[in-house]
Image (cartoon, grey):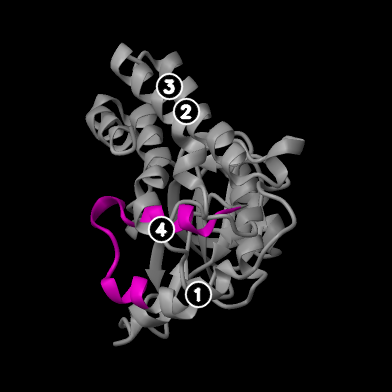
Amino acid sequence: MNKRLNDLIEEKLGEPVKTVSGVGGGSIADSNIIETTSGKRYFLKTGFTGTMFLNEANGLKELRKPGCIKIPDVIAADKQFLLLELITPGPRQKDFWDIFGRHYAQMHRYTAKAFGFYEDNFIGATPQKNLPSEIEKNNWTAFYFNKRLLFQYRLAEQNGYATNELKRAFTALESRIDTILKGSEEPPALLHGDLWSGNYITGPAGEPVLIDPAVYYGHREADLGMTYLFGGFSEQFYRSYNEAYPLKEGWEYRVNIYKLYHVLNHLNLFGTGYYSQAIRLMEYYI
C-alpha cells in the first residue's frame, strides 16, 4: 500500500495503520486485512479506479436496510479503496442453508416502487446499467431485456463474439421474451444481483453473510437464477426459500433466462469458453 493511500485511510480511521496483510481470492480488486495501533482490524479493497468501490459501498448499505441477513458494515469508501467491517468466519451452523434460504426470502420481500436503482454499478468488472426509462420503471420484461440481455449482447458485438449463430439465437429470443416471462409479474424486490458461491461467506456465529453485491431492484427469480450457475446451492436453501416466500408457477422454466445474463457477462469478460453455454441457454427457449 503506497504512502498516499495509507495516509488517506489513516485519516478516515483517525489512527495509524500498524500492519497490512494480503488476502487471496479477489479477481478484480486487491484484498487486505489491516490492523491499527489500537488493535482494530478491517477488510480493505484497493486496486481499482473509477466508481466501483463507491457503488459497492452503496449496494452494501442498501442490502442492510431489510435487517434480515448479515452484511459487512461499510467503514469508509473512496474511489481508491473500500474499507469494511472484518468478518471473522466461524464454524458453519448445522442449519446454515435453512437459515440462508429463509432470510434471503425475507430480503426479497423488501421492495421498491420501480425496477432498477438510483445509480449504475458493476457486475464483476462490467458496467451494469440500472437507471430505468419511464417504460422500464414498471415493466420488468422491458427492464430485463434492455438493461441486462441487450446490453450484454451489444458488448458481445463490440468484443467480436456476436457470430451469425449468436445473432440469430438472440433475435429469436427477443421475439419470445414477453411469452417467456408472462405470468411471473411481481413488485421490484431488493436483489444482491451477483449471488454465487464466491459471494457469500460464513460469519462468526456460523451464519450466512453476503459480500460483493451488484445491487438493484428487480425480479427475485433473477437473483435465484444466478445461484444455479457453477453447481448451484444446497437443495435445502431452495426448499426453505420457497416455504418462506413461494415462487410463482413456472419459475423453473425461467431459470435459464436469468442464467443467460451472467453467462453473456462471462463471455464478455473471459472469452469464448462461455459461448456454447450462451447459445444453449437461448436455444432452450426458441
Mark 3 vs mark 2: in front? 2
Closer to the chain start, of discs 1 and 4, is 1
Closer to the chain start, of discs 2 and 1, is 2
Residue 176, by quadrant, is top left
Q: Which region shows up in magenta?
A: 218-239
Pick the quarter of the image with the C terminus: top left
- Check disc 3 and give the amino acid type: Thr
- Check disc 2 and give the amino acid type: Ser
Q: Is residue 172 left or right of residue 50?
A: left
Q: CA distance from mark 3 to mark 2?
A: 7 Å
Question: What residue sits right under mark 4 in the picture?
Answer: 251
Q: CA distance from mark 4 to mark 2?
A: 20 Å
Q: CA distance from mark 2 to mark 1?
A: 31 Å
- Check disc 1 and give the amino acid type: Tyr
- Label number found at residue 245: 1
Question: What residue sits right under mark 2 in the picture?
Answer: 175
